[in-house]
Image (tube, coloured by chain):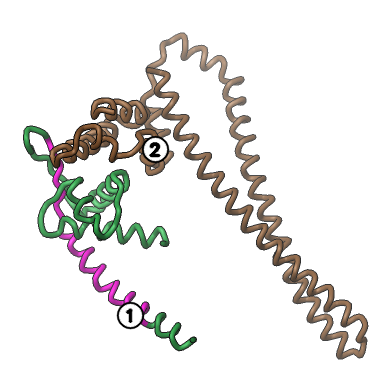
Chain colours: A green, B brown
Amino acid sequence: MDTQIKRGILDVCVLAAIKNEDSYGYKIIKDLKPYIELSESTLYTILKRLENADMLTVRTAEHNGRLRKYYRITENGAKRLEAFKSEWKEVMLIYEFVCKEEKNGD
Amino acid sequence: MTKYEFIEALRQGLSGLPKRDIEEQISFYGEMIDDRIEEGACEEEAVEQLGNVNDLVLKILKEIPLSRLVKEKVNNGRRLNALEIILLILGSPIWFSLLVAAFAVLFSLYVSLWAVLVSLWAVAFSFIASAFGGIFAAVVFLFGGNTLPAVATIGASVCLAGISVLLFIACKFFSKGVLLLTKKAVLKLKAALIKKEKSNE
């Protein structure tokens, strides 16, 4: 897949994983596993990128006597998700068009 | 490998990075291990699931811009004493010019690599252009009633077009190779920056 597209999709996947409730690194990887295989180093880069883009915030909280980082989606992040949905409606239309063309070509 | 060993190996591997980055990476991977253990994995398994430490270090390096590594290196340099500063200034006509020369040589080698590529592309394009030119000339010849020269120029045009297609393939191949080489060189440079830091400690 084109790297730019893949990067955008990965960002959206991580945002979607934290959209309903705050989540932490390992849980994000587990939640996304059925859809997309994410390595720890990739997740780290995405989280950093999203944090720098002000799409999520990080807080550290105690859990079972140790510290754990929780990620929360920001308004910007939620907007990005909404934008993704409408962008992909267009992409799906193009997809249908491409498939139809193939059929006609047969 | 235990969690402690993994974290220490990671710290060693990343030792040229800014302190804050190292701590952040370590707490991130430490948390990943702890969460796996909490879920029922034993320590050994949890560490294993993160993969090889050296591969991880390389992946992390790839994500960090070279400029940041160089900046960190410059900022982290230890303070020089008076004698060293005087020697550095006195020796500057020699070491500075040598340094500049070394950079110039490396840079010119790299530029000449691209220059070769650009000229190859230029040849490929000029062949295509002359192929079209040849066809045009052949048409002119035909209308002038010179059949033989027309056939000859068409033949030459087809040959040129064929050669240019081969050249295009070769150019694309070499361009990709040089790009790959650039990426590898940058990674090597990053690794070298970090390694030097290690030997300083």
**Extreme top residue here?**
B83
Measured as percent of width and height from the top left, residue B93 is found at: 60, 21
Q: Main secondary structure of the magenta part?
A: helix
The image quadrant of residue B171 is bottom right
Q: Mark 2 points at which residue?
A: B55
User: Considering depth in this image, is B163 or A64 the residue closer to the camera?
Assistant: A64
Magenta-span inclusion, residue A93: yes
Residue A93, label in figure: 1
Residue B58, label in figure: none
Label 2 environment density (alpha carbons within 10 Å; few <14, some 14–19, many ≥20): few
Distance Cα–Cα, label 1 vs label 2: 40 Å
The image quadrant of residue B25 is top left
Q: In screen coordinates, is A59 left or right of A88? A: left
Measured as percent of width and height from the top left, residue B149 is found at: 91, 80
- Disc 1: host chain: A
User: The residue under label 1 is which amino acid type?
Assistant: Leu
Name the secondary structure under disc 1: helix
Q: In screen coordinates, is B189 left or right of A29? A: right
User: Considering depth in this image, is B53 or A90 the residue closer to the camera?
Assistant: B53
Residue at image position (43%, 10%) is: B82
Range shown magenta: A67-96
Name the secondary structure under disc 2: helix
Mark 1 vs mark 2, foreground winner is: 2
